[in-house]
Image (cartoon, rainbow, N blue to C red):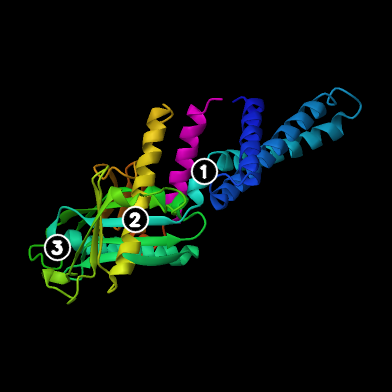
Amino acid sequence: MNFESLGQKLNLKIEELEKNLSSQIGDPISQVKELSLLKEKQSLLKDYLLLQKKIEETKALTDSELKEMAEKELVDLERKTKETKTKLFSKLFEEALDLKNAIVEIHAGTGGDEAEIFASDLLRMYLRYAEREGFRAEILDMVKTPLSGIKEAKILVKGEGAYGNLKYEGGVHRIQRIPSTEKKGRIHTSAAGVIVLPEAEATDLKIKDDEIKIDVFRSSGPGGQSVNTTDSAVRITHLPSSIVVSCQDEKSQHKNKEKALKILRSRLLAQKLEQDQESESVKRKSMVKSLDRSDKIRTYNFPQSRITDHRINLTVHNLAQVLDGDLDEIIQKLKDEEIKQKIESFKI
């Protein structure tokens, strides 16, 4: 890895952002966050290069009268260099996008009632995870079913780094367990799809009025019955992309429209980022495809209290704790693997 070239690129990007901020070009909030992240990377890189220089200077002293002292110092310098390098690589591949809030969408998949109950389990898991991590979670929309399940739910998880952690949850989650209605004790397999998006602010992406079609309708509850006497539910269709978003959780049409626009902006931002990556030919092979629900990422096996993450061949036997929101171990191992892959393919 050419660290000097990396340092030059960081310097140029920092100068560009500082110039934009002083000229009031672009969104100041997102630019300040990105600038802060870049300066952290720059500081760690300077520390790492300085330690490397000290190591070379100390190695030159091992042939002199100061050999014993130099060898002791060398051990300490190599330890500090290793620690700094680990921090550098961890921070190096962190993106400003990772600091954003996250929108998590959960959709019941194949498996009928059991899939809908599993979708409800996943919703609770993410709400508990947010609570454990000190994030704030808000349900944007939810469609319940008669058997305490959900057809779909959308939640906003607020807190710095929420998207950077939860982005690994995107994909198909599969469950294997014996349903309460199963009389012969057979294990059933069902699934739910999860989509994770970075929350897009109005300043991140502009949506013109003539690009959307807004329909209103009455909210429905479990079993499809109407739960509201007014047309408070909102469906927004983005005409250029054909993306459709609906919200009915609030009794206020205005609030449902506001939430639907928030979700639509986030979907459009994710789509734009994916297109940008492809056009720049920098899209690397990734274990995580947040927007492709055809990828089975994880299996929850109840009879063996086992969870397997298929992307990194990780198996843990603490199913109850994970479903209670204890996702730290799984997410950290996914982060470590992603950093490892990026280091291997990183070129300046």
Spatial CA distance of label 1 from label 3 is 39 Å
Q: Is residue 259 left or right of residue 237?
A: right
Where is 80 relative to 193, above or below?
A: above
- Taking the view exactly as shown, the residue that stands out farthest to the left is 184
Label 3 crowding class (10 Å Cα cut-off): few <14, some 14-19, many 20+? many
Say which residue appears at 33% left-offset and 64% top-offset: 140
SS class, disc 2:
helix
* Res. 202 image quadrant: bottom left
- Residue under numbered circle 3: 113
Say which residue appears at 53% left-offset and 39% top-offset: 93
The answer to if 346 sits in the magenta stretch is yes
Q: Which mark, by number, is residue 347?
A: none
Q: Quadrant of the N terminus?
A: top right
Q: Is residue 15 visible?
A: yes
First to last magenta residue range: 328-348
SS class, disc 3:
helix
Tell me which amino acid carries mark 2: Ile
